[in-house]
Image (cartoon, helix red, strand yellow):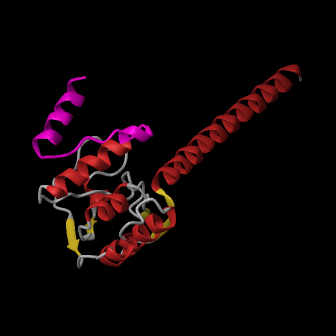
């Protein structure tokens, strides 16, 4: 719709690369290639290693794909950056953000040249990503949770649904009990 087109135009205007997060491997590969091209042009490339916004302000496990593969393919240093208070600016579920500045803390560049040529080793990708996430944790002061944010969002949604279902069942049981009580009183 119109909102989607305006959002896409804004992000394109500020130099954002589109990333198809539908899970298609080809789409992820295209995003990685785009990141490599940006760095090869001598420009800066930023990526959120969690892959999505934190549902509760905690720091979740980084995904061992884009960040690690781009860093290893280009040899570029990784500069960890922590954004502070983003969950206060636009809490999950809110459409409009509050007008305030996030805090930003920038760490020292990390050199991963020791892993050159190992960009297809999943253990190396995991180690590199974990090292970056550890630095972000130190910079941000956030509590680290060793699960993916997408899994946490799913758990939160499942818990909310279970609570809603339990509340609905409790109301139904109460209504049934009241109906039975009314029938009993009417019979007497």
- In this rendering, position of residue 186 left or right of residue 82: right
Q: Residue at x 31, y 57 (%)?
A: 48
Bounds of the magenta segment = 1-27
* Number of residue marks: 0
Residue 32 x, y percent position in the rendering:
31, 50
**Residue 12 sits above or below residue 53 on the image:** above
Residue reaching furthest front? 117
Quadrant of the frame with the N terminus: top left
Residue 120 point in image, percent of width and height: 45, 59
Point out the residue furthest to the right here. Answer: 188
Residue nearest the viewer, comparing 96 with 183: 96
Residue 142 screen position, x and y as percent: 38, 71
Q: 8 and 157: which one is in front? A: 8
Please tell me which residue is depicted at 70% across the width and 31% down the height of the picture: 172
Q: Is residue 148 magenta?
A: no
For image coordinates 28% across by 51% down, the residue present is 90
On screen, 35 above or below 146? above
Q: Nearer the viewer, residue 78 or 167?
A: 78
Q: Locate the C terminus by quadrant.
A: top right
Q: Nearer the viewer, residue 117 or 184?
A: 117
**Residue 163 spot, x, y in % from top left:** 61, 44
Q: Is residue 7 left or right of residue 19?
A: left
Residue sitting at x 35%, y 70%: 116
């Amino acid at each position: 719709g119109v909102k989607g087109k305006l959002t896409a135009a804004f992000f394109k205007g500020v130099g954002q690369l589109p990333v198809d997060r539908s899970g298609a491997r080809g789409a992820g590969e295209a995003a990685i290639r785009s990141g490599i091209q940006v760095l090869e042009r001598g420009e800066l490339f930023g990526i959120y290693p969690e892959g999505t916004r934190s549902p509760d302000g905690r720091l979740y496990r980084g995904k061992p794909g884009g960040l690690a593969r781009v860093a290893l393919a280009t040899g570029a240093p990784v500069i960890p950056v922590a954004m502070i208070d983003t969950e206060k600016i636009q809490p999950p579920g809110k459409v409009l953000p509050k007008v305030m500045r996030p805090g930003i803390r920038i760490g020292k560049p990390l050199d991963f040249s020791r892993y050159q040529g190992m960009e297809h080793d999943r253990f190396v990708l995991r180690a590199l990503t974990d090292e970056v996430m550890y630095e972000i944790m130190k910079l941000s002061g956030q509590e680290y949770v060793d699960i993916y944010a997408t899994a946490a969002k799913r758990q939160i949604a499942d818990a909310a649904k279970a609570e809603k279902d339990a509340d609905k069942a409790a109301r139904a049981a109460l209504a049934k009990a009241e109906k039975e009580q009314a029938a009993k009183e009417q019979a007497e």
